[in-house]
Image (cartoon, rainbow, N blue to C red):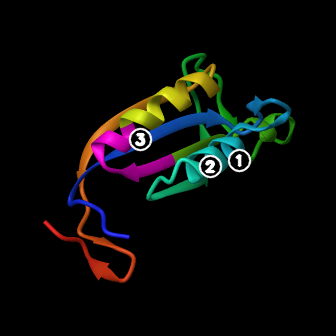
């Protein structure tokens, strides 16, 4: 699959315990994004962090360890990321979502075309 060099990164910060229709929100997002044909998505589980409420969540604190930060990153063309934002807006009720411009130098086994 060829992907343009000028792409966008959609980054979604969630709580590990966030749900969507009874399932993990991050898992539901990745499945839907794959169904939409996005170039790729990655989920990263944080070991420590805090959000707008300024409450510390850490893997060192047993009682709140299920609320660790989770980051979903999606890379694709500007057009596909714009379409994905509507999907994310529908599914994500709290957290932080942002988009930034990136330049992809390699995707898969080949260098991307300009």
Q: Which residue is mark 1?
A: 27
Residue 46 at least partly seen: no
Q: Quadrant of the C terminus?
A: bottom left
Work out whether residue 40 or residue 66 is closer to the camera in this orientation and state it: 40
The answer to whether residue 13 is left or right of residue 23 is left
User: Within the image, what quadrant is residue 95 found in?
Assistant: top right
Distance, label 2 to label 1, CA atoms, is 5 Å
Q: Earlier in the sequence, mark 2 or mark 3?
A: 3
Residue 64 at least partly seen: yes
Q: Quadrant of the N terminus?
A: bottom left
Q: Percent from the top left, x then y, of residue 24?
A: 77, 40
Q: Measuring 68% from the left and 35% from the top, which residue is drawn there?
A: 57
Q: Percent from the top left, x then y, of residue 76?
A: 36, 52
Q: Which residue is mark 2?
A: 30
The dot on residue 10 is 3
Distance, label 3 to label 1, CA atoms, is 16 Å
Work out whether residue 50 or residue 108 is closer to the camera in this orientation and state it: 108
Query: Magenta segment range?
Result: 73-81
Q: Percent from the top left, x then y, of residue 81?
A: 38, 40
Q: Does 85 sit above or below residue 100?
A: above
Q: Does 111 sit above or below residue 80?
A: below
Are the residues tagged 2 and 1 within 8 Å (C-beta)?
A: yes
């Amino acid at each position: 699959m060829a992907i343009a060099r000028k792409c966008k990164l959609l980054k979604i910060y969630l709580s590990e315990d966030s749900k969507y229709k009874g399932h993990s929100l991050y898992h539901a997002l990745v499945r839907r994004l794959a169904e939409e044909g996005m170039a790729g998505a990655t989920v990263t589980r944080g070991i420590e962090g805090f959000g707008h409420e300024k409450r510390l969540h850490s893997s060192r604190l047993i009682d709140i360890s299920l609320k660790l930060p989770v980051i979903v990153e999606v890379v694709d063309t500007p057009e596909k990321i714009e379409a994905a934002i509507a999907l994310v807006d529908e599914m994500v009720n709290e957290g932080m979502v942002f988009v930034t411009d990136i330049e992809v130098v390699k995707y898969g086994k080949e260098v991307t075309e300009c």
